[in-house]
Image (cartoon, rainbow, N blue to C red):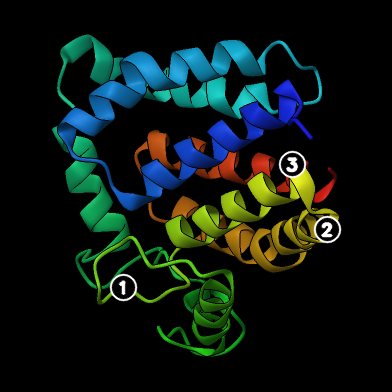
Amino acid sequence: MSISQSKIVLLNLTELCAAVFRGPDEQGWRELAIHGLPDLLGRVQKFSALPAAPLAALRDALSPHVETGDFSPLETEYVRLFIAGPGGVPAPLYESCHQDGACRTMGRSALSMRHRLAEAGLEISLASNEPPDHLALELEYLFHLCAQGWTNDSAQAHEAARFAGEVMEPWVRRFRAALAGAAPDPVYLAATDAALALLQAVAES
């Protein structure tokens, strides 16, 4: 069974969002901004049901960096927002840090993700000390569920919709609120909005 073109575009959007939250280096940002994003936006705009507006906002947020050819501020901002900001990390990239109660890594959601990844036979593709409920890893897991489910496994497709809508979307919304409160570079806010639009689209697929 083949995947529809609109769902291929959703898979590509999942890859783009995962790449942003993995933290591209300067060359990675350049490739994404100059080649990957414009191509994806052009294909998204062909389908009225797909989220073009957040990708257009991401394109616009990246345009000053494209004009100057300097993407290094995005690397610095990634560190400030997600790894080691002055006075603390404003918006950790881990599901465990956006649940009710104290913000801490390796909480229940991290253990749940470790189990999901093991069940699927997937390996963590980030640094070995990264908790498994990192946003990029959850997006990669979602990609796996969608790719499997939309080709030949209706149970996986159902799980993809459930994981996107019930597991990821609630905490990514809380993550966005934390991010917005940290005066972020608009690139990261636009990328988060693109991820949320993606999650909604998958949940409704």
How dense is the environment of label 3, judged by Cα within 10 Å: few (below 14), some, or many (20 and up)? some
Q: Is 178 left, or right, of 84 in this rendering?
A: right
The image position of residue 197, as x and y in percent, is: 68, 40
Image quarter (top left, top right, bottom left or bottom right) of the C terminus = top right
Q: Earlier in the sequence, mark 3 or mark 1?
A: 1
For the residue marked with disc 3, what is the amino acid? Thr
Q: Which residue is mark 1?
A: 130
Q: Earlier in the sequence, mark 1 or mark 2?
A: 1
Q: Is 187 left, or right, of 121 in this rendering?
A: left
**154 or 132, which lies in front?**
154
Image quarter (top left, top right, bottom left or bottom right) of the N terminus = top right
Q: Which mark is residue 158?
A: 2
Asked if residue 91 is positioned above or below residue 12 in the image, the reply reads below
Label 2 element class: helix
Label 1 element class: loop
Q: Which residue is mark 3?
A: 151
**36 or 53, which lies in front?**
36
